[in-house]
């Protein structure tokens, strides 16, 4: 595409976004004035759905964000007439009142979904708790998966956050994480029974993870560090998606690319539903027969995706990643290929994330967990043969010297859990102090070792939480 054509396409897309936004504000204002069966309301609803569909085209969603009263559609600033004849001011005032910072529309939206959502904006009455979380929960419980609300605050990288912000982001992360786990569970069970899965629901949860990482990757990384879930297989797929998407952010993938990457990561182990359950849950080490069965799951995964689902760009990525994620850059691994060939970027990203989470969990391939630092050291030793060198080095910098979720002893005698890696000083992360010389801390305190006021305190060593009888998971799952 030449520059002139590209500029023309950009102008057309901005114009389509302007039309869509205008139609949305007209609809929102009309919803406040008329009942759902009113002809004028039904007409504006139809108009907005038409404009939204035209704007999306072949894309899989649309994100509207509000930042300092400026409107952005898919990260593109969209100037729009603020004349209140189309209801902009009244709608934005309502957004501020509810703490809404944006909307995400999925490609499977229906007029009924949009109608329920836009009327909820005006009828919702907040009780105790976070209005945004309550409204998103109401949409989910109502079976509406094509619309979700975004928080008003989008934190710049490295900006300090207060206690209220931190708790809000952690609650959002937990909600996103467990919705993703349930989505994977339902996806795996449906696949095992030969039923159709909700592709829209899966895409929506991936976009929730993307939005969460864009605000605060640490909260999800902390949840991914938990390895003692009863249904680890489902949590593992979510963990791999979190690690893969965070890597994708670091290398600058677009939102559509991130969506496809996260989708592929959730499906990377779908082939395991075709294996005997007692093999996956076997407590003893694998023998050669077990391994011969386990090595079939990439091929089974690709076949499952190809046979049971409609192939679009997301599913094509999932098929390739399911097949390739155990094939190494040097051609070793499995399945065995007749000739060495380049491995897809998404498969290489997922391979790094999958290996790290599997080894630190000690659930399937090995039967005892390895500390994260030891896993990174092991993976670095295998770099070049088993992993993409650039991606692995980036991943190591992401995980840090003291990985998120690690229990550490500080030089002044307190004990804490690492909650955030400081990229500028990886040996000085942020730590949540849970105990000191006087016993457990209540409430716990966040302590940034990279802060100039904290230079006298250092991490002495990583502690074994089981040896000291400390349930790190309990702290991660609470504020």
Image (cartoon, rainbow, N blue to C red):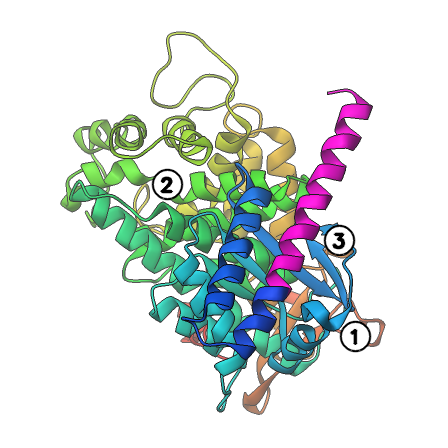
C-alpha span from label 2 to label 3: 35 Å
Specify whether 65 is left or right of 302.
right
Task: Say whether disc 2 or disc 1 marks the residue closer to the N-terminus.
Answer: 2
Crowding at mark 1 (Cα within 10 Å: few <14, some 14-19, many 20+): few
Specify whether 93 is left or right of 122.
right
Secondary structure type for disc 2: helix
Residue 423, percent from left and from top: 73, 54
Q: Work out whether residue 164 or residue 476 is closer to the camera in this orientation and state it.
A: 164
Task: Specify the quadrant of the image occupied by residue 156.
Answer: bottom right
- Whether residue 132 is visible here, answered yes or no, is no
- Whether residue 306 is visible here, answered yes or no, is yes
Which residue is tagged 2? 267
Mark seen at residue 78: 3
Q: Is residue 171 magenta?
A: no
C-alpha span from label 1 to label 3: 43 Å
**Residue at 72% across, 74% down:** 89
Residue 84, percent from left and from top: 74, 72
């Amino acid at each position: 595409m030449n520059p002139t054509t590209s500029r023309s396409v950009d102008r057309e897309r901005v114009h389509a976004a302007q039309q869509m936004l205008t139609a949305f504000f007209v609809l929102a204002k009309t919803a406040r004035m008329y009942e759902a069966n009113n002809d004028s309301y039904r007409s504006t609803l139809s108009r907005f759905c038409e404009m939204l569909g035209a704007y999306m085209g072949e894309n899989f969603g649309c994100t509207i964000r509000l930042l300092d009263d400026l409107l952005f559609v898919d990260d593109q600033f969209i100037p729009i007439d603020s004349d209140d004849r189309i209801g902009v001011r009244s709608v934005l005032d309502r957004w501020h009142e509810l703490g809404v910072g944006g909307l995400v529309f999925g490609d499977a939206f229906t007029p009924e979904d949009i109608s329920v959502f836009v009327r909820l904006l005006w009828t919702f009455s907040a009780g105790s708790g976070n209005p945004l979380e309550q409204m998103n929960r109401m949409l989910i419980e109502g079976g509406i998966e094509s619309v979700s609300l975004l928080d008003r605050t989008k934190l710049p990288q490295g900006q300090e956050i207060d206690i209220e912000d931190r708790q809000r982001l952690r609650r959002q992360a937990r909600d996103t994480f467990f919705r993703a786990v349930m989505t994977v569970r339902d996806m795996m069970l449906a696949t095992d029974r030969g039923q159709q899965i909700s592709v829209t629901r899966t895409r929506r949860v991936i976009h929730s993870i993307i939005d969460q990482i864009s605000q605060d990757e640490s909260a999800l990384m902390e949840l991914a560090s938990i390895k003692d879930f009863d249904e680890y297989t489902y949590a593992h797929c979510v963990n791999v998606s979190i690690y893969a998407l965070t890597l994708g952010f670091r290398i600058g993938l677009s939102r559509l690319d991130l969506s496809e990457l996260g989708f592929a990561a959730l499906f990377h182990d779908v082939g395991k539903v075709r294996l005997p359950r007692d093999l996956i849950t076997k407590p003893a080490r694998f023998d050669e027969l077990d391994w011969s069965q386990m090595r079939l799951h990439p091929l089974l995964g690709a076949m499952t995706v190809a046979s049971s689902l409609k192939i679009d760009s997301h599913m094509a990525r999932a098929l390739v990643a399911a097949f390739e994620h155990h094939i190494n850059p040097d051609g070793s691994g499995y399945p065995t290929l007749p000739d060495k060939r380049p491995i897809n970027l998404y498969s290489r990203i997922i391979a790094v994330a999958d290996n790290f989470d599997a080894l630190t969990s000690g659930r399937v391939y090995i039967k005892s967990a390895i500390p994260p630092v030891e896993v990174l050291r092991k993976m670095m030793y295998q770099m070049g043969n088993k992993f993409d060198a650039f991606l692995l080095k980036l991943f190591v910098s992401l995980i840090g010297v003291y990985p998120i979720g690690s229990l550490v002893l500080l030089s002044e005698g307190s004990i804490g859990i690492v909650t955030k890696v400081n990229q500028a000083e990886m040996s000085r992360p942020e730590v949540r102090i849970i105990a000191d010389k006087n016993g457990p801390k209540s409430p716990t305190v966040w302590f940034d070792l990279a802060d100039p006021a904290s230079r006298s305190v250092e991490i002495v060593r990583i502690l074994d939480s089981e040896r000291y009888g400390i349930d790190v998971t309990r702290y991660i799952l609470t504020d």
